[in-house]
Amino acid sequence: MGDTVYYCGGYWDEMGYKTMPGLLGRHEYQIDAKGRVSLPSAFRRAVSNNPLVLLQWQDSHLDLFPDETWREIRKNLLSHRKARRDRGAYLRRITAAATDVEPDKHGRIRIPDWLRDRIGLTDTVLFIGALDRIELWHPDRFQAHLDETDAGDDDFAAQIFG
């Protein structure tokens, strides 16, 4: 496809279809007794009730991948598995830490106990829009992450924003 152009109130591609600017924002929601949590409405619209992949590949948080993003990651994983046979154990750790999730009719997903335990989620989850994926954080852990400063952040920001 082509360029996306912003016009008052939305993003439109060259064919005239309204598009999303990416998964953005921060939303805090409660996890119910069955381990279910409602996807924020903006994210729900963006993923259109398609299957998602919930995965922990970093210690700090979980990532929720929309189908389109997951297809690209899956291709990368398969390519690396063939090219780097020495990385098989790492790839198994990644795929073992993943699960398919599908929003129910109320827009909720279930976060398995074993994944909640791995990042310390108890009753609240913080959803962070990360452009092509949704990150799920423990709110306190996310704040601690933000409080950490990286000397390269200013240079990186200047490269992106000018």
Image (cartoon, grey):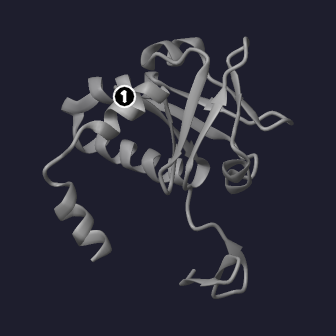
Name the spot of residue 4 as percent of width and height, x first.
Answer: 57, 81
Residue 159, by quadrant, is bottom left
Image side of residue 128 versus residue 10, left or right: left
Image side of residue 121 versus residue 140, left or right: right
**Can you say whether 25 is above or below 36 in the image?**
below
Name the spot of residue 73 as percent of width and height, x first.
Answer: 43, 48
**Can you say whether 25 is above or below 30 in the image?**
below
Residue 20, by quadrant, is bottom right
Q: Residues within 10 Å of mark 1 (few under 14, many from 20)?
A: some
Q: Residue at x 63, y 88 (%)?
A: 14
Image side of residue 131 versus residue 82, left or right: right
Q: Nearer the viewer, residue 154 or 114?
A: 154
Q: Nearer the viewer, residue 116 or 152?
A: 152
Q: Residue at x 81, y 33 (%)?
A: 104
Residue furthest out toward the right: 105
Q: Residue at x 39, y 43 (%)?
A: 78
**Can you say whether 31 is above or below 117 in the image?**
below
Residue 16, by quadrant, is bottom right
Query: Which residue position holds label 1?
Result: 60
Name the spot of residue 131 as percent of width and height, x first.
Answer: 49, 57
Image side of residue 142 versus residue 115, left or right: left
Q: How many marks?
A: 1
Name the spot of residue 64 as percent of width and height, x first.
Answer: 54, 39
Q: Amino acid at mark 1?
A: Ser
Q: Residue at x 32, y 35 (%)?
A: 145
User: Which structural element holds mark 1?
Assistant: loop
Residue furthest out toward the left: 151
Quadrant housing the C terminus = bottom left
